[in-house]
Structure formats: structure tokens, C-alpha cells
Amino acid sequence: MNEFLYSTLRAQGLAKDAATALANIELRKSEAGPRRPFREPRTARDEAIFVKSGLLCKYISESGGGRQIVGLRFPGETILPSRRDRRFGIQAIVKSQVLVADADALDAVMADHHEIAALFYEQSQRDNAINHEWMLNTGRRDSISRVSHLLLETAHRSQKEGDFAELNNPFTQQQIADITGQTSVNVNRVLADLERRGLIQREGRRIIFTDRRELERLSGFRPDYLQ
Amino acid sequence: MNEFLYSTLRAQGLAKDAATALANIELRKSEAGPRRPFREPRTARDEAIFVKSGLLCKYISESGGGRQIVGLRFPGETILPSRRDRRFGIQAIVKSQVLVADADALDAVMADHHEIAALFYEQSQRDNAINHEWMLNTGRRDSISRVSHLLLETAHRSQKEGDFAELNNPFTQQQIADITGQTSVNVNRVLADLERRGLIQREGRRIIFTDRRELERLSGFRPDYLQ
DNA sequence: CGGTTGTTTGAACTGATTCAATCTGTGTGG
DNA sequence: CCACACAGATTGAATCAGTTCAAACAACCG
């Protein structure tokens, strides 16, 4: 039985027996590196991918060579199986350890433990809430707000505790661009601008929030939607 | 018992007894007009809103007065209850008839019919798939592609049949702008441009697809994700 | 060291916004 | 049936945020 998976499920409110059953599914341990896709776009998504450590992203590539990252998965989060949506590929942002379970095996357990479907529903709804924020971000906010919003969201999602003063930013500027719908050149200018304005400090990729209030204000970030 | 709801649920693969139970929940019939919000942002989302006719949207307003539409609901689709995500408001695009069920009543039925949670999960996953497309749209595609993509998606989702030659477009240009992350001025120019290029014809709001292949090509539209 | 990946900077360009005015269609009340 | 109001569509001109292209620089690593 996998301990981390079990305690994560328990923390999400799943009953003991259901959590035990899920954590006892046959899990393939796997490692995903940032270099190449972990799962190619348009391949079957008939498995649950649980992130043990690291950071994964879902992405869609476009004909014009453009690339949009449409979702992130931090440790403790899962890419749930989906019959329909095999549009996106999966790639590690940083080297990640993941646990992979077959959808068939999942289905078997779900037949015995009905709360699991409700949990998956909850998780999917949370994804939706995050998607809404991202849509608002790319659709309506300016460059600075978008990047700030992403940094704050990332800090929130990667900490267990609610409070933080800095972020061990895992993204390249190109990846920030792929999330916020810009070019890496502009992301670079925005980051430099945020630093010049005294809202953040940078040490390599590490980011220190020197004025989090103001950053939250100007990005419109309110952590409610993360739960 | 509500017939339309029942047959919709059956068409989505729900078993007879579960569909019957759901369609027998106490449903408040209600009408939503396009003038003012049907549900204000930040109010409880402890109800399921089933669209009988018309068209609803979920929207988020921004401090700067900007507004982003983050989801649409065509007849037969539902806005599911959500504990967390009360960020968005709900508004009718055109006059709509809806059926509203309390989350409590839903929960009671779900306790007896476990397949329902799985169905909600499926629906939520479909929303996510649509969100991904929209994120790709606003994040990476140019103005023309965005608008074309929306028109094609709308045509698909509003028809039962897969094939269509025209769309009784329900949107104002401002609403198209709110969905695609632009200004109404530019939407106007894009529509004029599409017509000038011979890809569509317009008669009032009605849109005739005179070159659907090319429209699909340039917008990158592939209907897979709609199911 | 050489190779590779990522960051930074400058200059020119452009797609889309902004602001403002005009036009069109529709509904309403007199 | 006209006058008026109002919402939405259309157009033009000026402006700007962000892109594109290109080159230089820094950091890392086997």
C-alpha cells in the first residue's frame, strides 16, 4: 500500500476503507523528466497519474508551433483518466516521480467504493475553478497581472501552509509564457519590471515576494478558488 | 416527473431507475432573461441548474470593468453545484427556461444511485475539455481563429445533428468579445473580414458557413472534444 | 572546454485597443 | 404612425502592448 497516496486521500476526506482500497491498487512507479513528453497528445488517457513529487503539466500544441499549457499538477494532485479528452499531452516541468494506475483497476475499486466517484467529481470541479481563473487571466488581464497571478497561484499550490514569503519557481520563462499566453521575451520584461518596481526580488529562479499585498492587488489574486 | 430531463439523462447513459429518481426531484421552473444576472457572482452555488431552452453563460467580472465569459450551457446541459467555485455569475445570453434543483435534494438521490456521481464526473470532465480548447483559443490563436472557433463550437453544441450549414448566432459582438478575450470593435472587424474572405455570410445575426472546411482549418477546430 | 539550455536586451513592427462618432434596427409611448 | 430612446453594429484615426527577429550573455554540465 502506498502511504503518501493514502494520506493524501484521507486528507481529501475519503473514508478509511475506500482510501485503503485505492492505495492498494497496482501502481506503476515512474519517473518523468522535463526533456520530453511523458505522454504524447492524442494517446489514450486510460490511467490515473498521481504526482508524488515534482511538477507535471498538461499542454496542447498548435499547428503554428505555439504551445499552451492548460493545467498543472503539484505533488498530491492527480491527472484523472478521461475517455474523451485526449487532446493534451503531459510533460514534466521538473523531474517528477509519479504513480500510474490503470483505469480498469480504478473502475473495479470504484464499483465497491462509491465515494470515490464523488471525490473525482470534486477534483474535476476544482480543476474547472482553476481553469476559470486562467481563462480570466489570459482573456482579460494584462501581461503583468498574468505573470503575478501565476506566481502567486504557484506559491499557494506548492506550499502546504497558507503563508509564504517566497517561491522556488520551477518554471522557465518559456513555460510561464506557455501558461500565460505570451512570448518568453515579454515574460522576461515583465519579471524585470516587477523587480524594478520592488514587488519581487529574484535570485536565479527563486522569487522573493517583497510586496505580496500589492502583488495580489494588481493581479486580482484571491486564493479562494484553490479551496 | 420532467420528461426532457429524463430523456437527456437517459441519452447520457444513465440507468432507468437513477434517471427516474433524478427527474422526480423537486424542480423549480424559472426563466432567465438576458438583461440582468440570473445568479450574482459570489453567491452560493448549492443547486443544479438544468437548461431546458435558451442559453446561459458563466462569467467573471474583473476590477477594471472587464468581463470574461468562462462557460456556456446549451439546452440539455447543466450547471452543477460546487462548494468551492462561487466566483462566477450566471447570466442568460438569450431568454432561457431553466430547472433548478437543490443540492440537498440531489445529494439524497445520489446516496441511492451511485452512478449519478460518475455522470457528474463525466460532465465535469467534458467542461474541462472545453476549457482547454478555450484556453488554447485565447492564449495562442489569433483573433480570426478565435472567433471562427467559437462560431463552429456554438454551431456544434446547439445542433443535435452533427451536420449544419448555418448558425442562428445567439451572441452580440460584445459577448463574442467576452468569450474570446477581445474588444467588440475587433470582433466586428473580424466578422467583416471573414465575410469579405467568403468564409461566412451574415444576415443579421444569422451566420451561413460558406466554406466550413477552410473555417475549420484556420481555426484549428476539431469537434472531438465535444464528445 | 565545448555544447546546450535559458536569460537578457535592442530595434522594428503589428495586431488589437481605445476613443469617438455615426449608423441601423427595434421597441415604446403618445 | 411618428418621435424618441436605446442597444447594438460599424467605421476611422491614433496609440500601444506585446511580438518578432536577432544577437549577446550567463549558467550549467558532462
Image (cartoon, coloured by chain):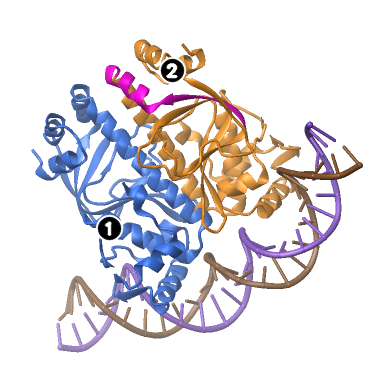
Chain colours: A orange, B blue, C brown, D purple
The residue that label 1 is drawn on is B34
The residue that label 2 is drawn on is A26
SS at mark 1 in the image = loop
CA distance for labels 1 and 2: 51 Å
**Amino acid of disc 2:** Glu
Tell me if residue B61 can be seen. Answer: no
Q: Which residue is painted at 61% across and 49% down in the image?
A: A177
Choose top left, top right, bottom left or bottom right for residue A10.
top left
Residue B163: give x, y in percent of width and height: 25, 61
Given the image, what chain letter belongs to the residue carrying mark 2? A
Asked whether B150 or A221 is in front, the reply is: B150
Q: Is residue A107 magenta?
A: yes
Left or right of B112? Residue A78 is: right
Left or right of B112? Residue A159 is: right
Q: Nearer the viewer, mark 1 or mark 2?
A: 2
10 Å crowding of disc 1: few (<14), some (14-19), many (20+): some
Left or right of A79? Residue C6 is: right
Q: Which residues are magenta?
A: A95-113
10 Å crowding of disc 2: few (<14), some (14-19), many (20+): some
| Picture disc at residue B42 | none
**Amino acid of disc 1:** Pro
Given the image, what chain letter belongs to the residue carrying mark 1? B
Q: Which residue is painted at 43% across and 37% down in the image?
A: A127
Tell me if residue A171 can be seen. Answer: yes
Residue B166: give x, y in percent of width and height: 27, 68
Asked whether D22 or B74 is in front, the reply is: D22
Left or right of B185? Residue B58 is: left
Q: Is residue B101 magenta?
A: no
Above or below, A26 against C28 in this view is: above
